[in-house]
């Protein structure tokens, strides 16, 4: 393709590329948290083992804030500031999925599979940060909100493919087919960053002609990571930024704990079909989560992010409480009674919807509370904290699995609702007021 096929000069091509790269990020998430998690539950593994496994997929995202300074500081500018990193990440994702296909038994070799999933998500998290950086570089101010929403929605599309679609493929075929399909999709997606330049005049490949091009928004790269980390420490020295981090660290522990426990409960205790559960969690649930994300962003702008975080958190806690009240000890009927399936579907859909509402509202709050001087790195650090919250829950799910599911639901209903007591302590404008807009 000629220089005319550049992301900086073609808005529709830029939008398509950013969204398709977000689809690539969602596929492995859906594959691990839906397809593989359901398969492992059906294979008889304990909730603690499945929780530890899914934590391996989430763990690299807790350290993704490290990628920001590296991507800003190092690269191959003649090929674009972000494109080489995206190509590296895509290549790593393709290689790791291919290697998974050669594991003899996914259940017998669960430790090896877990490490492969972890390495895969190291590359996936790298791509996430590089694509976000590309969006910051190239998007005009008037299109950022619209494109950000479409990018976030594209990740849900990837989750749908990795969850509901791959679950159905597994049902009619085997894991070799599932891995081949994933690799094929990732290779096709890789063609976008491979054959498109960020800006006219840049090299398409290391051995082709081209030079580094200057950008208004990224003309000055960080020259010292020590300075950046010093500023980041200053940004996290205020009461509001610290409490915002504590809230993020706490909010999703419950969902992390309950996800593996709930899958084991449904499949091993209630006898749910794997495809049916995949359709709910990776199908309807994904699209309702997308709706929650879009609605959450709109409501956060309309009523304020803190109010919507509080509303979503209360509703999520109440969904845990209400489903826990269906326990045979309380309701007087067994879990196998006629209403259970409908209640399970409602619980999955409502809890997923509320997690999305909370997440997008947190994004809005974190953008506002971040110090502009290190906004990208600070915001990424907050995203890492949210992922760490989920990892803590997944990693400790084995301990809570020793309790009956109703008790676990009651515990985290209380924890979820109690967190909102911290929200009034946050002044979202404190950072800019105290530290200023510039160094």
Image: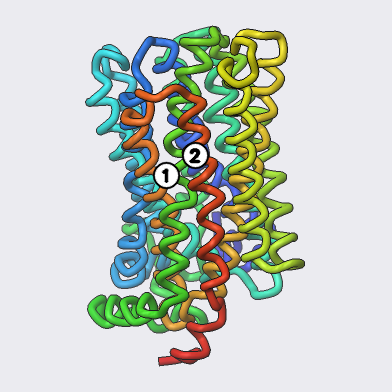
Callout 2–callout 1 Cβ contact below 8 Å: yes
Colouring chosen for the image of the structure: rainbow
> Residue 181: in sight, yes or no?
no
Q: How many marks?
A: 2
Residue visible at 54% across and 70% down?
Answer: 367
- Work out whether mark 2 precedes mark 1 in sequence or the reverse, and give the earlier one: 2
- Tell me where residue 275 appears, x and y as whole percent: 58, 14
Query: Observer-nearest residue: 285 or 116?
Result: 285
Which quadrant would residue 322 be assigned to in this image?
top right
> Residue 28: in sight, yes or no?
yes
Q: Determine crowd level at label 1: few under 14, some 14-19, many 20+ residues with C-alpha closer than 10 A.
A: many
Q: Is residue 112 above or below residue 306?
A: above
Which quadrant would residue 231 be assigned to in this image?
bottom left
Q: Is residue 224 above or below residue 147?
A: below
Q: Is residue 269 above or below residue 227?
A: above
Residue visible at 51% across and 64% down?
Answer: 422
* Mark 2 and mark 1: Cα distance apart in space: 7 Å
- Tell me where residue 181 appears, x and y as whole percent: 49, 24
Q: Is residue 90 left or right of residue 111?
A: right
User: Please, what secondary structure does the residue beneath circle 2 have?
Assistant: helix
Residue at image mark 2: 255
Query: Observer-nearest residue: 371 or 210?
Result: 371
Query: Observer-nearest residue: 86 or 271?
Result: 271
Name the quarter where the C terminus is drawn. bottom left
Q: Is residue 277 left or right of residue 209?
A: right
User: Please, what secondary structure does the residue beneath circle 1 have?
Assistant: helix
Q: Which mark is residue 390?
A: 1
């Amino acid at each position: 393709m000629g220089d005319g096929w550049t992301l900086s000069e073609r808005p529709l091509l830029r939008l398509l590329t950013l969204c398709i790269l977000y689809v690539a990020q969602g596929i492995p998430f859906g594959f691990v948290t839906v397809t593989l998690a359901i398969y492992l539950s059906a294979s008889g593994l304990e909730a603690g083992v499945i929780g530890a496994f899914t934590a391996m997929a989430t763990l690299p995202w807790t350290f993704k804030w490290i990628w920001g300074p590296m991507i800003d500081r190092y690269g191959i500018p003649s090929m674009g500031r972000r494109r080489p990193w995206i190509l590296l990440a895509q290549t790593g994702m393709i290689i790791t999925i291919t290697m998974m296909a050669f594991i003899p038994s996914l259940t017998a070799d669960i430790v090896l599979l877990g490490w492969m999933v972890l390495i895969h998500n190291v590359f996936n998290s790298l791509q996430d940060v590089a694509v976000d950086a590309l969006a910051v570089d190239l998007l005009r101010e008037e299109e950022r909100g619209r494109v950000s929403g479409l990018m976030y929605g594209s990740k849900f599309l990837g989750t749908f493919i990795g969850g509901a679609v791959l679950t159905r493929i597994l049902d009619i075929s085997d894991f070799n087919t599932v891995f081949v399909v994933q690799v094929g999709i990732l290779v096709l997606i890789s063609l976008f960053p491979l054959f498109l330049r960020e800006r006219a005049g840049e090299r398409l490949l290391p051995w082709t002609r081209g030079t580094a091009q200057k950008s208004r928004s990224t003309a000055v790269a960080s020259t010292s990571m020590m300075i950046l980390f010093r500023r980041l420490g200053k940004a996290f020295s205020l009461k509001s930024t610290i409490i915002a981090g504590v809230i993020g660290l706490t909010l999703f522990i419950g969902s992390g704990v309950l996800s593996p426990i709930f899958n084991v409960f449904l499949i091993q205790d209630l006898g749910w079909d794997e495809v049916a559960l995949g359709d709910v969690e990776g199908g309807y649930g994904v699209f309702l989560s997308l709706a929650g994300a879009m609605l959450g962003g709109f409501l956060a702008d309309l009523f304020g992010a803190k109010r919507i975080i509080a509303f979503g958190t209360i509703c999520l806690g109440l969904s845990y409480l209400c489903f826990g009240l269906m326990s045979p000890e309380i309701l007087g009927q067994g879990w196998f009674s006629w209403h259970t399936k409908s209640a399970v579907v409602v619980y999955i859909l409502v809890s997923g919807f509320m997690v999305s509402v909370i997440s997008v509202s947190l994004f809005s709050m974190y953008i506002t509370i971040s110090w502009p001087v290190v906004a990208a790195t600070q915001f990424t650090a907050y995203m890492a904290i949210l992922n760490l919250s989920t990892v803590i829950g997944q990693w400790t799910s084995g301990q809570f699995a020793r309790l009956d599911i109703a008790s676990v639901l009651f515990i985290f209903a209380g924890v979820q609702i109690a967190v909102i007591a911290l929200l009034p302590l946050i002044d979202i404008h404190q950072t800019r007021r105290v530290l200023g807009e510039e160094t």
